[in-house]
Image (cartoon, rainbow, N blue to C red):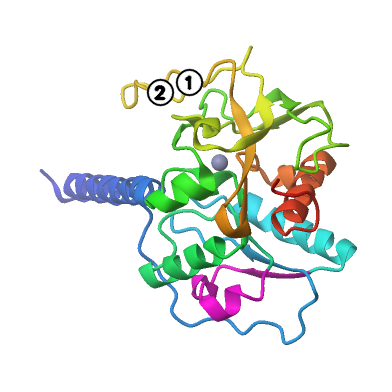
């Protein structure tokens, strides 16, 4: 083989190897999360308002970069309007007893992967078990966290997949709300239509005592997450009862709220979506509604 052909062959094989390592790392990151941890807590603002929100977006798993970047100014604007303090960070070392105590609600905005150390997990669990508020968005409910308590108590369902062809689809959402509800759902739209990447879960959060705020009308949608030659067991949805937003009161006054919506950056510019999230913050932070 002449020198030039050898050079072309080795270059091709090197690029193939680099590509395979890159794809392999990405798939592993999405499924299991890479172990990048934080050990030095951030310096929080000295002045905090009466109602304070922690906005956490660390992605050791899938990086929803556009959605995360779009959510920060949207929540900051919401906080300003309501006279709340908001602190946005990717630094997981904020999950310590002293600093968590300063916040009424902790938002996980597309935070993915195993992003807390064991010690930070204990601090967060204690915060929630002592009456804290949690609001999880989209990727926060994927299967990359590997934490039983988190799935069973905060998220309430186990992620299976999302549609791939097409990945983003417009769909109708239906509100579950009556006048006796302890959740402040009155005034939210009974039905609305929007586009997103719709998560499919193996189990229904109702079976774990969660109450559903919105369901997704699957009819007419393509729910398959199969990938030709690679994945062939994901050709299903959740059927006629497909919860998409749900919430639950925890023992000792803690409140958890999860919305599977929010894949796209545009999601955080939609007034109805933001109105739902704002209500979610108000409820998880005990500004509205109850746990009767
Ligand atoms: Zn997504």
Asked whether 102 falls inside the magenta stretch, the response is: yes
Nearer to the camera, 17 or 129: 129
Q: Looking at the image, can residue 120 be seen?
A: yes
* Residue at 78% in and 56% down: 74
* Residue at 86% in and 66% down: 80
Which label was assigned to residue 224? 1
- Give coordinates of residue 85: x percent, y percent: 77, 71
Give the position of the N terminus as an image quadrant.
top left
**Horizontal side, residue 216 vs residue 236: left or right:** right
Mark 2 residue crowding within 10 angstroms, few (<14) / some (14–19) / many (20+): some
Disc 2 and disc 1 in contact, CB within 8 angstroms: yes
* Residue at 21% in and 51% down: 7
**Horizontal side, residue 186 vs residue 65: left or right:** right
Nearer to the camera, 283 or 168: 283
- Give coordinates of residue 195: x percent, y percent: 70, 30
* Residue at 63% in and 55% down: 68
| Placement of 164 over or under 41, stated as above or below | above
Give the position of the C terminus as an image quadrant.
top right
> Sequence-wise, which precedes: disc 2 or disc 1?
1
Where's ligand 1: which quadrant? top right
């Amino acid at each position: 083989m002449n020198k030039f052909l050898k050079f072309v062959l080795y270059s091709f094989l090197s690029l193939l190897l680099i590509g395979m390592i890159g794809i392999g790392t990405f798939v592993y990151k999405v499924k299991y999360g890479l172990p990048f941890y934080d050990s030095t807590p951030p310096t929080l603002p000295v002045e905090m308002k009466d109602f304070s929100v922690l906005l956490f977006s660390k992605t050791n798993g899938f990086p929803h970069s556009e959605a995360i970047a779009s959510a920060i100014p949207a929540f900051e604007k919401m906080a300003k309007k309501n006279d709340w303090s908001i602190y946005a960070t990717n630094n997981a070392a904020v999950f310590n007893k002293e600093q968590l105590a300063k916040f009424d609600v902790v938002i996980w905005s597309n935070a993915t992967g195993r992003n807390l150390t064991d010690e930070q997990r204990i601090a967060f669990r204690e915060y929630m078990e002592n009456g804290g508020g949690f609001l999880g968005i989209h990727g926060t409910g994927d299967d990359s966290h590997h934490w039983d308590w988190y799935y069973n108590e905060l998220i309430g369902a186990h992620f299976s997949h999302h549609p791939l062809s097409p990945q983003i689809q417009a769909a109708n959402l239906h509100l579950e709300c009556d006048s006796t509800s302890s959740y402040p759902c009155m005034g939210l739209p009974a039905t609305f239509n929007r586009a997103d990447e719709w998560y499919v879960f193996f189990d229904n959060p109702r079976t774990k005592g969660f109450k559903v705020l919105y369901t997704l009308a699957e009819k007419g949608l393509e729910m398959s997450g199969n990938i030709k030659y690679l994945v062939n067991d994901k050709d299903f949805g959740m059927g006629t009862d497909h919860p998409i937003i749900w919430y639950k009161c925890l023992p000792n006054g803690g409140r958890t709220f999860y919305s599977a919506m929010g894949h796209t950056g545009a999601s955080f510019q939609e007034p109805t979506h933001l109105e739902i999230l704002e209500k979610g913050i108000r409820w998880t932070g005990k500004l509205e509604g109850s746990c009767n």
